Image (spheres, rainbow, N blue to C red):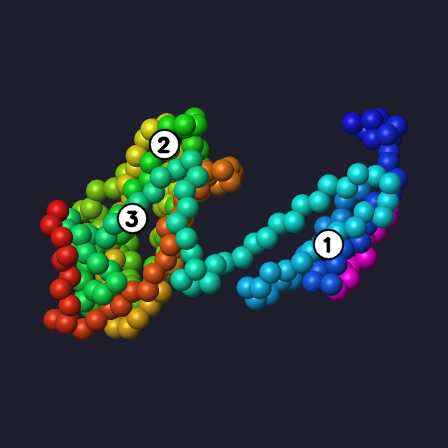
Amino acid sequence: MGKYAGKNAGSPLMASYTLNGKAGKAVPNKKSMFLTDVAVTGTKANGFVITNTGKSMLFVRVMAEGIPAQGTETKAESNLRMNIAYKTLGGRSIDVGRIEQGTDFVAEVTITHPGILSAYQNMALTQIFPSGWEIHNNRMDDVASAISTSPSTYEDIRDDRVYTYFDLGKNQTVTYKVILNAAYLGRYYLPLTYTEAMYDNSVTARLPGRWVEVVAPGSNTVVSAKK
């Protein structure tokens, strides 16, 4: 590769760019690659223009990263299927949009390999919970340890979230359960639930977040359906 690059060296990198009509940082002409951060704020459309002022072919990548605003997330699945249900400890479905303080309940995430690709390795499930809910740690709590869940490679339980790492065979379905308690009165935002193959961006699934409320005991009917 070194010999090839030496014999086929192109002209220096020469380019310029503008963001929303404003000139950006100068692009050096002595390097074969240029990387810069471009700050974008707000939700309006942004115009990005790149001009090649040299003689060599340029290959441009624009990568955008960010966190969706609350309430703007959407459901998406790519080579993966995911569903989430909330249930009582007895297995009956509940609506967490309005739940009584002191209620113990289960967040049950089911993930399925659709069978199109080969087995998935190094999968990660991210569950972040509202600050009004508390997580029962199944390593320290007898209640949580009584709930059956699929095997995982590793589970990281924190104050407000649970990271679950696992492998997923072709056509395999796994179910991971987290026991929660509606601890504090108030209205909170439940963030999106997200699953991905850590080293393959084509394997992902997400479910949008929602607003939830913890109400005083006696002011709400918890169970909404039978098992």
Which residue is identified by label 3? 84
Q: Residue at x 72, y 50 (%)?
A: 35
Magenta part of the protein: which range?
Answer: 22-31
Please state if 199 lies on the left or on the right of 14 as rendered: left
What is the CA distance from the residue labelled 2 to the residue labelled 1?
Answer: 40 Å
Residue 173, horizontal then vertical, whole percent: 30, 34
Q: Residue at x 69, y 56 (%)?
A: 48
What is the CA distance from the residue labelled 3 to the residue labelled 1?
Answer: 42 Å
* Mark earlier in primary sequence (2, 3): 3
Q: Please tell me whether residue 27 belongs to the stretch shown in magenta.
A: yes
Front one among 149 and 11: 11
Residue 30 seen in the figure: yes
What is the CA distance from the residue labelled 2 to the residue labelled 3?
Answer: 17 Å
Number of numbered callouts drawn: 3
Residue 195, horizontal then vertical, whole percent: 41, 45
Answer whether labels 2 and 1 touch (C-beta < 8 Å): no
Number of the front mark, 2 or 1: 1
Amino acid carrying label 3: it is Ile
Residue 215 sits in which quadrant?
bottom left
Answer whether labels 2 and 3 touch (C-beta < 8 Å): no
* Mark earlier in primary sequence (3, 1): 1
Q: Quadrant of the N terminus?
A: top right
Residue 24, horizontal then vertical, whole percent: 76, 60
Instruction: Classify 98 as above or below 53.
Output: below
Q: Please tell me whether residue 189 belongs to the stretch shown in magenta.
A: no
* Mark earlier in primary sequence (2, 1): 1
Residue 114's mark?
Answer: 2
Q: Residue at x 56, y 54 (%)?
A: 65
Amino acid carrying label 1: it is Val
Which residue is identified by label 1? 49
Front one among 206 and 55: 55
Residue 167, horizontal then vertical, whole percent: 39, 34
